[in-house]
Amino acid sequence: MTAFRYDINRPMKVLLVEDDELLGAGILDALERARYTVEWVRDGMQALTALRGGGVDIAVLDLGLPRLDGMDVLRRAREAGVVTPVLVLSARDTTAQRIGGLDAGADDYLVKPFDLDELLARLRVLERRTRGSVSNLIRYGTIALDTSGLTVSHDERPVELQRREFMVLRRLLENIGHVMSRQQLVENIYGWDSELESNALDVHIHNLRKKFYPELIRTVRGVGYVIDPLPVARQG
Ligand code: CA
């Protein structure tokens, strides 16, 4: 399996697996209106191929399918190491079936007939989960900041930061191109009512520039600090 880094601006790609033309067209329309990129396949073998091929962010999977049953698609995809979140659509509304689907690796289960708005709401939950699990890493040129591990690297080498330096850098990186006022940054590291600690901010900024490079953080006189967006050519 190829791991790929998630780009927050890229539309989510949904694999729609539904052999019922009318229902499939309805779901396709709803998904496209919700700005998803959709690949629609109508049988189980195509579904398995698409899932194993990678690049799918979320799958909406019907169970009663030609060529390969949806439950088998799911089981075989999971066995092959596919971790894509799968929302199962099914007319089989018994508890046993539902448990079977979840056991086979479904992330959610919607019983037909269902409301399209509910389908979209469930997808948003899966989407948040997907984005959350992979968006821990903030990359800026040669700098990579991992918000879950609280680590930072520069040119693939770890950089030792004090906790407060980390917090300042994180806040600035999360707001690329937006000037953060001194007050915002100070509150971020010391909490409210932190007038007295304001000078320490300059020390943190000084240290960050020294540990990375001087132009990383730009001073906006009388306002605060900003990390500017990278020129396109230097990105990546
Ligand atoms: Ca069907």
Image (cartoon, rainbow, N blue to C red):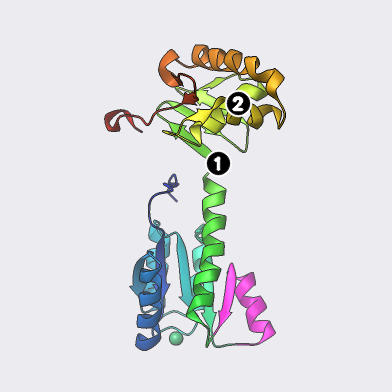
Please tell me whether residue 128 belongs to the stretch shown in magenta. no
Q: Determine which residue is flagged by label 1.
A: 136
Q: Nearer the viewer, residue 224 or 69?
A: 224
Q: Is residue 72 above or below residue 136?
A: below
**Where are the magenta residues, as a range?**
93-111
| Element type at mark 2 | helix
Q: Nearer the viewer, residue 210 or 96?
A: 210
Q: Which amino acid does the dot numbered 1 rest on?
A: Asn
Q: Which amino acid does the dot numbered 2 rest on?
A: Phe
Question: Disc number at residue 166?
Answer: 2
Q: Nearer the viewer, residue 46 or 153?
A: 153
Mark positioned earlier in the residue sequence (1 or 2): 1
Q: Could you classify mark 2 by the number of other residues whose Cα lies within 10 Å: few (under 14), some (14-19), or many (20 or more)?
A: many
Asked whether residue 196 is in view, the answer is: yes
Q: Is mark 2 within 8 Å of ligand 1?
A: no
- Residue at image x 47%, y 72%? 60
Q: Nearer the viewer, residue 142 or 220?
A: 220
Count of marks overlaid on the render: 2
Of marks 1 and 2, the one in the foreground = 2
In terms of image quadrants, where is residue 189? top right
Could you tell me residue 40's position as x and y percent?
35, 73
The picture quadrant for ligand 1 comes to: bottom left
In terms of image quadrants, where is residue 96? bottom right
Q: Is residue 93 above or below residue 56?
A: below
- Residue at image x 55%, y 57%? 128
Q: Could you classify mark 1 by the number of other residues whose Cα lies within 10 Å: few (under 14), some (14-19), or many (20 or more)?
A: some
Left or right of residue 181, residue 29 in this image: left
